[in-house]
Structures are given as C-alpha cells and as structure tokens.
Amino acid sequence: MMMLFFIVMAVSLIVITNPGPEQDHEKRVRNLCEEIKRAAEGVKDVTVDCQTNRINFGPQAFFAVNSFGISSSTKTKLREVVPVIISVANKNPDRQLLRRVVIEGYASKSGTYLHNLQLSMRRAEEVLCGLFENPGANERGLTLEEKQVVRDLFLVGGYSFNDAGNRSSHEAQRVEFRLEFLGYKDGASSTKSESRPPSDEVDGFGTCRSRVL
C-alpha cells in the first residue's frame, strides 16, 4: 500500500512539473493577453481583462439613448489603442494564437430586441469606420499596414441587450473589444488568412456612408 502511495505521488509530481500541451497552450494564450494588457496600460481609461479577454474603454465608449454616433475624441482614443494591439500581435512569437478581435456593440434593455439588435450592430460598425477615418491635427492615424490588419483581423457584432445584466441603462449602451484566441484543438489552418493583394496594389478601403436607424 505504501509503495502504491509513492507511485501515485510520483506520477502527480510529474504532471504538475511537466504540464501537457493543452496546459502549455493556455499559458501561451494567457501570456499573449497579458502582454497586450501591459502595453495598453499607457492608454488612459482603457482596461484589458484577461479573464474575459475583453478590452473596455470606459465612459468614452458609452452611447446616448437610441444613438450610434461617437465623438471625435472617442475615435481618437480608439485609433490610439488599436495600434497597441497590432504591435503586440505582430511582435509576439505566439501572435498566430490571436484569431480575431470582435468589436461588440450593446444596447440597454429599453426598446425591442430587434431594434436594439440593429442599434448595437450600428454602434460596432461606427467604431470600425472610425478607425479608417483621417486623423485630426497632431493625431497619429493608422498606417496602411495597420488598416490592412484591421481589415483582416477585426469583425463587428451586435448583441442587442444580451449581457446588459445589472448594468445601468447608460453603461449598457457601449462598445467593447473581445480578443478571440485559437483553442488548443484548432488546427494551423485556422490561422491562415485569405490571400490579399500586396500593399502597393490596394486601391483604398472604401468609405462608410452615413445612415439612420
């Protein structure tokens, strides 16, 4: 019985000191998120939560009732933090683990589900469009290469009032970024992006037209 005890303890020690490939994958994902978090600490009011893999912009990403317009100052803040994400993703040896960045728009519980679904999607789209706008005076805009990464890596989604939870009506009307990482069982093919034209062959990204609900 004592011998069996020592065998079990030895096996347990090996498992603890030599984590399997799945645990190693989770550690690499966590380290990548933590690096993005550290890099974003210099951007005021921006917080990165590596438990939920979300980037929160605080009050500056809140919307007025039934509105999807964002201020020029908020657009400036977004154009400030996105290059941080891209820079870390490009430099980190595990950058292929970042599958995509989802811009998630939300609404309050006031109003119908479908109206809020459309409203929340418009909010996410407005944020994405703001990234491609020309910067103001003394502002650093996204480079051509960064815009290409946004085009390939960023998606938008509207979630109506799902996830409103116990948030106030004002706080529920927001936009967040969600970092989506590859799972352990996702194959290498999941990281391959579609073939895109070289930088000098890209003829603009188009423009976003003004719309109303």
Image (tube, grey):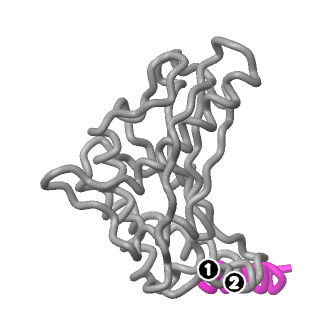
Closest to the observer, 113 or 49: 113
The amino acid at mark 1 is Asp
Identify the disc placed on residue 24: 1
Does the stretch in magenta take in 5?
Answer: yes
Residue at 55% over, 18% down: 66
Q: Quadrant of the N terminus?
A: bottom right
Identify the disc placed on residue 16: none
The residue carrying mark 2 is: 21
Q: Residues within 10 Å of mark 1 (few under 14, many from 20)?
A: few
Q: Report, in whole angstroms, how far the alpha carbon at label 2 lies from the one at label 1.
A: 5 Å
Q: Hey, which residue is sitting farthest left in the picture? A: 138
Does the stretch in magenta take in 171?
Answer: no
Residue at disc 1, secondary structure: helix
Residue at disc 2, secondary structure: helix
Task: Count all numbered tags in the image, as a single digit.
Answer: 2
- The chief SS type of the magenta part is helix
The amino acid at mark 2 is Pro
Residue 84, quarter of the rendered image: bottom left
